[in-house]
Amino acid sequence: MSLHSQSGIRASGKASQAPATGATLARVGALAVLVALLAVPFLLYPVFLMKVLCFALFACAFNLLIGFGGLLSFGHAAFFGSAAYVTAHTVKVWGLSPELGILLGTAASAFLGILFGSIAIRRQGIYFAMITLALSQMVFFLALQLPFTHGEDGIQAVPRGVLFGVFDLNNPLAMYYTVLGVFLIGFAIIWRTVHSPFGQVLKAIRENEPRAISLGYRTERYKLMAFVLSATLAGLAGGTKAIVFQLATLTDVTWQMSGEVVLMTLLGGMGTLTGPVIGAALVVTLENYLAATSLPVPVVIGCIFVACVLVFRRGIAGEIQARFGKQSRSG
């Protein structure tokens, strides 16, 4: 056997080992993160952690639409807040269990997603964004006027109840692990969607929609499905948040909430799976710890956002992936 053929065999062997090594490292990293998530409520304040998880799921749902579908929505607070109101009302007034309340809130946001998506998906770019913002403001007006929302007072003192008739959610640890379970389910749905044939078509539409149309794909149907799925998962986050904080207010449906989830996604890394989680954790941590100071929280977060945009053009997770990707290719 010649020297060139031996070197070729060694090179191909290294190339085949690289994906296996990368997959193993990914599994080990995922397991380590899961163990950390299970242990962290014994080290940090559980309510703070639950807030991070709720907004992380909200940001991941939004990222599914903009990062993988290329659709910028300025109205995602409509789904987050509507689910919070429906969940809070059904649990407090109707006396439903927390799991049923969250499911009804999620179903309400899915219905709104179908309705809003059918209207907005016919436009692109800034027109799509403005339509979603206008529709979201309509939801804000309804939340302000409808009797069951209690206007500016919101729905307060929502009972956490007993999950499946077994787990008392008034226990902080039981509540935390419930929220963690909801987040992991939502994240798994997003991961599976992104790595499915549907997700690949969605990425193709994001990159070059005319070409996807020329290949025979009905792009409006794919975009509508992505919009509805994103709205549904945003509602899941909103309904869970209403149970955690026992509250649903106008803050959940304001345009500022829509802007905040955009900020989280861009800071962490749009188009990455872990980026929105990092961005949500960063923003919630800053809001939590800066609230006890005299510093203007929005100004500080805005400055950090500008600095991250200048230094990390792809977001925090995007830059990390890009740099490690270059190192692995060079190696």
Image: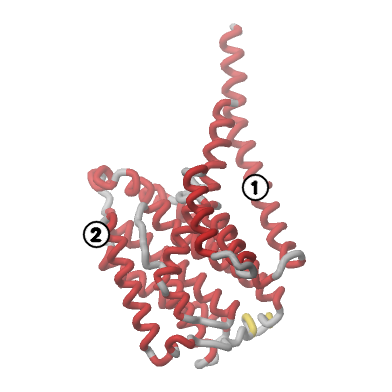
User: In the rendered view of the protein, which quadrant contains the N terminus?
Assistant: top right
Q: Position of residue 238 (x, y in %)?
A: 50, 73
Q: Which residue is mark 2?
A: 123
* Label number found at residue 222: none
Q: Residue at x 47, y 64 (%)?
A: 260
Q: Residue at x 54, y 65 (%)?
A: 296
Quarter of the image where one finds residue 230: bottom left
What element does badge 2 sit on?
loop
Q: Residue at x 46, y 68 (%)?
A: 234
Relative height, residue 285 to residue 269 (above, below): below
Determine if residue 104 is in view: no
Three-letter amino acid code at the position of disc 2: Arg
Q: Position of residue 15 (x, y in %)?
A: 57, 27
Residue closer to the observer: 294 or 173: 294
Q: Is residue 218 left or right of residue 285?
A: left
Quarter of the image where one finds residue 66: bottom left
How packed is label 1: few (under 14 Cα within 10 Å), some, or many (20 or more)? few
Q: Which residue is mark 1?
A: 27
Three-letter amino acid code at the position of disc 1: Arg
